[in-house]
Image (cartoon, grey):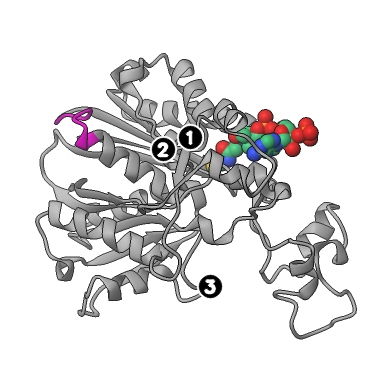
Amino acid sequence: MLRSKIGGIGYYVPEQIATNDDLTKLMDTSDEWIQERTGIKERRYGKKHDETTATMGTAAARIAIERAGITPNEIDFIIFATLSPDYYFPGSGVLLQRELGITKTEIGALDIRNQCSGFIYGLSIADQFVRTGMYKNVLLVGSEMHSMGLDYSTPGRNVTVIFGDGAGAVVVQPTENEEEGILTTKLHSDGTYAEKLAFISPGSHGGYHAKKLGLGTEEDFGFDKEIEFGEIFTTQKMMDERQLYPQMEGQFVFKLAVTKFPEVINEALDDVGLKTSDIDMLIPHQANLRISQFVQRRLGLEDHQVHNNIMKYGNTTAASIPIALCEAIDEGKVKKGDLVCLAAFGSGFTWGSALLRW
Ligand code: COA
């Protein structure tokens, strides 16, 4: 049985820094509030008109491909995880293929929509393809251009201050060395609370879920009830009432996240007969520094066993794990043979973990 490993890794963050003080000029917030609740000091914003989710993903992918010792045309399969794609369709995977100059068409490109868990879901998919021998070089990219779609007014402050732009990429390859590679991945989902952290319009929902859940009428969600067919994807009412933005019940998300992170990490450890004390490096999805610190305490890990960088990049959703993993490796914090644990929780809700021997 083949095993898969991360053969190359890279990341890219845009140059433009948006500090907490920059945000205070747009909305009623403060550096103190943001740092105290989230640990975030600054985040990066892509260059409008010149950078996109796909181009940032491409920049990260070029590094990962080079470090994997291959060329773009040797990629067999692309997995692109994002919640902020360039287009509603097609997905950013094919745009990345074009940007990378991959001319062969004997490859597949899959876009996945698993928000903060996107990278873990993608890694699990890549692992299955490589283990079965179907593909040799799977390029997995997590990239987000949040800055294009946030509400920079005070009503949007609880969401907007958290998110930043960036991209991370890995090339997943086969290995016959039993001392390295992906040991296990665990994936979970629960749609009960889909609207607790969501970007619901534009979409095809037409108010259906809100009505069923008793959250409000069609009109409350920006639709004209009288319209039987035609344009209800985006309405003027949605724009006027500023409904075309992500929304979040922060405390609800926080409470669930701090339960699910340790749970799914322990599940992966149990699966391969290891203990929390065996973890050399934990890379938690960078949702909020307070969540990471809570998880660290729960697992009894020391500071040097957890890598956080949310302070400088904010929450980059599908990109946060590969960015943090790459940074930890580049800083010499991950050595050959180390047990690395990746874990994420986010919108859906979806959550997951992965254990790898570096
Ligand atoms: N600046 C200043 N005040 C803010 C603010 C901001 N950026 N955002 C919210 N507030 C205000 C609220 O309006 C509220 O004011 P009120 O009491 O007058 O109504 C008050 O702060 C408390 O709001 P609340 O949402 O309860 O704050 P919180 O302590 O839960 O912190 C989060 C908010 C978002 C930082 C926190 O809930 C969180 O991090 N949750 C998890 C989010 C997450 O990780 N999401 C990604 C998952 S992948």
Label 3 sits on what residue type? Answer: Tyr
Label 2 sits on what residue type? Answer: Lys
The picture places residue 82, in percent across and down from the top left corner, at: 45, 58
Q: Quadrant of residue 336?
A: top left
Q: Tell me which residue sits at (27%, 60%) in the image.
A: 59
Quadrant in which the C terminus is drawn: top left
| Residue 335 painted magenta | yes
Above or below, 346 relative to 60: above
Q: Residue furthest front?
A: 25
Q: Tell me which residue sits at (74%, 61%) in the image.
A: 242
Bounds of the magenta segment? 329-336
Residue marked by disc 3: 88
Mark sitting on residue 312? 2
The Cα–Cα distance between marks 2 and 3, rounded to whole angstroms, is: 29 Å
- 354, 242: nearer the viewer: 242
Q: Are marks 2 and 1 in contact (CB under 8 Å)?
A: yes
Residue marked by disc 1: 41
Label 1 sits on what residue type? Answer: Lys
Q: Nearer the viewer, mark 2 or mark 3?
A: 2
Q: Characterize the local packing of mark 1: few (<14), some (14-19) or many (20 or more) Cα atoms within 10 angstroms.
A: many
Is 208 placed left or right of 292 in the picture? Answer: right
Sequence-wise, the earlier of marks 1 and 3 is 1
The Cα–Cα distance between marks 2 and 1, rounded to whole angstroms, is: 6 Å
Above or below, 342 relative to 105: above
The picture places residue 15, in percent across and down from the top left corner, at: 35, 52
At numbered mark 1, what does the secondary structure look like: helix, strand or loop? Answer: loop
Q: Residue furthest right?
A: 226
Q: Characterize the local packing of mark 3: few (<14), some (14-19) or many (20 or more) Cα atoms within 10 angstroms.
A: few
Sequence-wise, the earlier of marks 2 and 3 is 3
